[in-house]
Image (cartoon, rainbow, N blue to C red):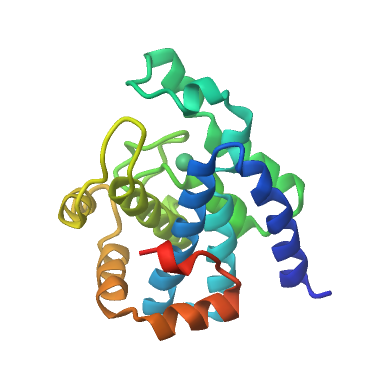
Amino acid sequence: MDEMAAMDDAAEMIIPLLRMSELISEHSRRVSLLAVLIGRVLDLSHEELHELKLGGLLHDIGKMSISQGILKKPGKLTHDEFAVVKTHPVLGGNFVEAICYPQQIVDMVRYHHERLDGSGYPFGLAGDELPLASRIIAVADVYEAMTAVRPYRPALSVCEAFAELSQANRYDQAVVQALKRALSSVNLTDLCELAREFGTPDVKTAL
Ligand SMILES: [Fe+2]
């Protein structure tokens, strides 16, 4: 079994654990697909696309360590509860590192809540400190989260999501433009091809 297939198998074993919260599992699969679509527009290599797929699937794995009471709370989180949630990128990154995934995937998990201007968490990294793959997961994550229904609010519109993503100080605009291009040009044939090539499931509900 080659290294990529072994990583896929490991991811598929881990994903059911995330079904403790269906919301996370669905969200992660959609982020994974969006990240691959962005990567394709940016002409990334097959290996890089594969890493994006896994980074998207696993980016919120650290939430396994956070109580369901906090994750499923319908109302606004308290300051202390949010502090707990903010630990998930580090917990997840440590987990992915412990099972010997490539550093690029560890970085995607650890840095997916970082922002270009240093306003993100947990490290407050900025600018060039953020690898391209982490910027891609960040944009896919925000777009998916905003356009999906959450327990505490209805889905926001695509326009509202892109209004957030248009903040050049926070998000890589080349990545945002790539997402726009991907969403405007993707078709069913593309999605089926991606599903075959990368095993990304749930394509019919992904966009
Ligand atoms: Fe997250």
Left or right of 24 in this view: 161: left
Rendered image quadrant of residue 189: bottom left
- Give the residue displayed 56% in from the left and 35% down from the top: 63
Q: Where's residue 105, x and y in %?
A: 60, 56
Q: Where's residue 64, x and y in %?
A: 62, 34
The number of numbered discs placed on residues in the rendered structure image is 0
Examine the rendered structure and indicate whether residue 80 appears above or below residue 41: above
The answer to whether residue 101 of the structure is visible from this angle is: no
- Give the residue displayed 37% in from the left and 19% down from the top: 77
Examine the rendered structure and indicate whether residue 121 appears above or below residue 40: above
Please state, as top left, top right, bottom left or bottom right, where the C terminus lies in the image: bottom left
Q: Nearer the viewer, residue 126 or 30?
A: 30
Left or right of 146 in this view: 36: right
The answer to whether residue 135 of the structure is visible from this angle is: yes
- Give the residue displayed 21% in from the left and 53% down from the top: 168
Examine the rendered structure and indicate whether residue 192 appears above or below residue 72: below
